[in-house]
Image (cartoon, rainbow, N blue to C red):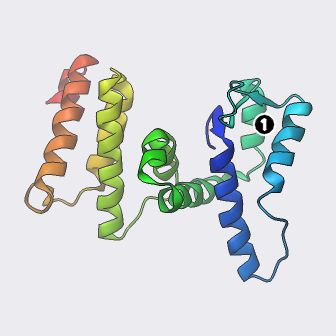
Amino acid sequence: CLGATFDEKVVKLLWCAFRREESKKGDSLSSGDDIRELLDAAVADGFVTLANEDGSGQYVFVHDKIQEAASLLTAPGDAHVLHNWVGQTLMEYLDAKDLGVSLFVVVNLLNEGTLPTEKSKRIELAELNCRACNAAMEMAAFESVARYADIGTSLLEEDAFCSNRQLALDLYSTGAAAESCLGNTEKME
């Protein structure tokens, strides 16, 4: 669920967070140091390859069907729970720079997970969708902009133009601009 390209650091972060949760249940698990060994084994078996040889720890699935098969290991009913947990974990543990680099992955995971019901969490996710919306707009990825804006606005309260005026304005105006670029004039209005 991390995408076709993923970072060893992110995988290790998630593994360590998982281990912390499991240790609360009394389970004994290996250390996060074995992630490198597991990734090396995945490379040796031909499932992933290093994205580049600069030592950055970036890996890429060798084929989209391998990534798809890996995703299918999660039970269909549990996928939204997993996406939500991974997205929340990345938000909690990534520093600002790494979160910026992984913004689309994190926002997509959270959007695919169970959407929050608590107002502050809804606003936080709307703000992340707004960041993703603006980043996608810089890349002229108008379909993505429209999707992030649509999800972001759906998370806002009815009185958003009073309670979160700037956020609401940013989401609606950027979404409308994207819809205009896509030729969806009805949705733009």
Specify whether 99 is left or right of 126: right
Q: Residue at x 53, y 54 (%)?
A: 87
Above or below 73: residue 55 = above
The quadrant of the picture occupied by the N terminus is: top right
Image coordinates for residue 14, horizontal then vertical, percent: 65, 57
Taking the view exactly as shown, the residue that stands out farthest to the left is 162
Callout 1: SS: helix
Q: How many marks?
A: 1
Taking the view exactly as shown, the residue that stands out farthest to the front is 54
Above or below 59: residue 11 = below
Q: Name the foreground residue: 146 vs 28.
A: 28
Image coordinates for residue 149, horizontal then vertical, percent: 29, 40
Residue 45 quadrant: top right
Residue 136 quadrant: top left
The quadrant of the picture occupied by the C terminus is: top left
Identify the amino acid type marked 1: Ala
Q: Residue at x 72, y 34 (%)?
A: 68
Image coordinates for residue 31, horizontal then vertical, percent: 80, 64
Specify whether 135 is left or right of 106: left
Image coordinates for residue 4, horizontal then vertical, percent: 65, 31
Q: Name the foreground residue: 27 vs 113.
A: 27
Q: Name the foreground residue: 106 vs 181.
A: 106
Q: Residue at x 47, y 39 (%)?
A: 101
User: Pointer 1: residues within 10 angstroms few (<14), some, or many (20+)?
Assistant: few
Above or below 81: residue 57 = above
Residue annotated with mark 1: 69
